[in-house]
Image (spheres, grey):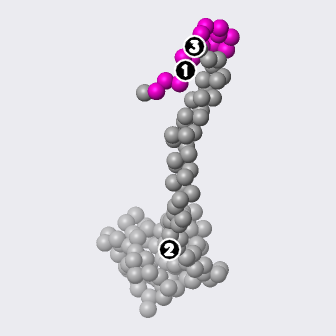
Amino acid sequence: MNRIARVAPTNATETGTIPMSQADEALRRVIADRLVRPVLEEHERVKDPLPTRPPRPHPQGSTRTTLDFARPSTAAAIGPRRPGVVYYDGPRLVQVAGVITDESESQRVLKRRAAKFAIRLVDQHAGTAYYTGAVWTGSDRVLKAVA
């Protein structure tokens, strides 16, 4: 390894030493020449760093609430839940009041960025309404279907 200079305090009078500030400057130049400059040159040499994708289309404020627009995976997660259907989901007997398949609207009502759909339910015993994003499971049972 090459040595730049013996480092000494700024007021050094000994022969063969240089002031600390000059040693620091020499070290900065070596770092700039050997480390920083090659990285910058490589960055400037690369013309097209990453391919860009076109932006996703915006729904332009559409409030889709039917399952016609739902993706197949979203439709499978929603299952047979349509407005008016009464089903038992374990601890509760609930009626579906509405289904939201618009992602931005479901993310807003559920306050979750990953929400794909939201279902507005009414608890039949308590009479309270709430939204859920739970998927349809094998333990859920339809008690009253609506065509």
Mark 1 or mark 3, whichever is nearer to me: 3
Observer able to see residue 84? no
Is residue 130 or residue 4 the one in the foreground?
Answer: 4
Magenta part of the chain: 2-15
Mark 2 vs mark 3, CA separation in Å: 76 Å
> Residue at label 2?
117
The N terminus lies in quadrant? top left
Mark 1 vs mark 2, CA separation in Å: 68 Å
Amino acid found under the numbered disc labelled 1: Ala
Q: Quadrant of residue 81?
A: bottom left
x%, y% of residue 35? 51, 41
Q: Is residue 22 above or below residue 87?
A: above
x%, y% of residue 122? 52, 72
Which residue sits at x=50%, y=83%? 83
Q: Earlier in the sequence, mark 1 or mark 3?
A: 1
Observer able to see residue 44? yes
Is residue 53 or residue 59 the one in the foreground?
Answer: 53
Q: Which mark is residue 16?
A: 3
